Image (cartoon, rainbow, N blue to C red):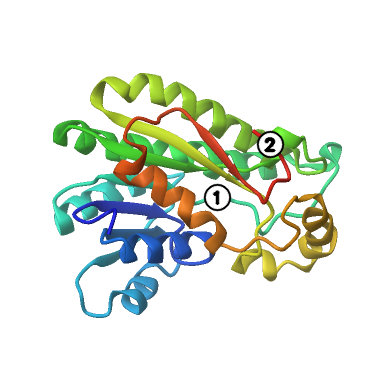
Amino acid sequence: MRCSGQVAVVTGGAMGIGRAIVQALLAEGAKVVIADRDGAAEAATALDNARNSVIGVACDVSSPGDTEAMANAALEAFGRIDVLVNNAGVYSSLKMTPFEDLSVDEWRRVLDVNIMGQAMATRAVTPAMRRQGGGSIVNVSSGTPFKGVPFMLHYVASKGAVNAMTKALAKELGAADIRVNAVAPGFTLSDGVLDNPHQLERLQEISRQARVLQRDQHPDDIVGAVIYFASQDSAFVTGQTLVVDGGAYFH
C-alpha cells in the first residue's frame, strides 16, 4: 500500500498502459482519476468495485480547458492531487513513414498530444500540488529518443522533448517539493499496438531480439517503475528518466 492516502490522475488511463497503471495505483491504495478522450467513465465503472476510489473524466489533454476541468474534477471528488501520470499520447495508431512523407497535420497531431498534452496536464495540477506542499509528476516517455529509431521522426522528436521537459520542470518545481520524473518504455504490446498489424510486423520481433531479456514487453512491465516514482520510495529522486525496455538500451 505504498500509495495509500494519495490521489493520482492518470491521463490516457482507460486502456493499455494507462489502464495497467490505474490498476496498480488502486492496488497500492491510491484513489485515481482516469482522464481519457474516450472510455474514461466506462473504465472507472469497471475498476471501482463500489469502493468509490476511482472516477472517469473525459479529457483531451491537448485542450487547456479539458485539463483544467480534469484537475477540478479530481479536487471535487477527492480533495487533493498527489500524483499526475502523463500517459496519454499518440503512438499505436502511427505507421512507420519516411520523414519526407510526414504531413504537417500529422506532425502537429503528435506534438499537440505528446508534448503540449503533458505540459497542459502538468500546468493544470501544479497549483493544487503547490498548495498542499508537494507531489509527484510521472511522464511516460519512450526509449526511442535514446536509440534514434527511424521512420517515426515526429514521435521520436516528441518523446525527446518529454525527456528534456522532465529535467527542466524538475528544476522549476523542486522548490515546491514537486518531483518530476519519466519512465521510458520499449516497444510494448498494449491494446492499441495489438490492433496495429503494421507496427507488429515491423517492430515486434526486432524489439524482442534487441533486448537482454528477450521476450515481449507488456503493460504490466512498466507499472513498477511508475509506482516507484509515484510513491515515497523515490522521495529524493527527481529529474530522472528510467528506461524500462528489458535491456535494449542502457541508460
Q: Amino acid at mark 2?
A: Phe
The quarter of the picture where residue 148 lies is top right
| Image-based side of 249 in relation to 33, left or right | right
Query: Cα distance, mark 1 to mark 2?
Result: 24 Å
Percent across and percent down for residue 151 are 82, 43
Between circles 1 and 2, the one closer to the viewer is 2
Q: Is residue 180 above or below residue 37?
A: above
Q: Nearer the viewer, residue 69 or 135?
A: 135
Tell me the number on the disc at residue 123. Answer: none
> In the image, is 57 to the left or to the right of 162?
left
Q: Residue 248's spot in the image, x, y percent?
A: 73, 45
- Circle 1 residue: 89
Using the image, determine if residue 192 lies above or below residue 12: below
Horizontal placement of 143 versus 183: left or right?
right
Element type where label 1 sits in the image? loop
Q: Quadrant of the C terminus?
A: top right
Above or below, 234 relative to 200: above
Residue 250 is marked as 2
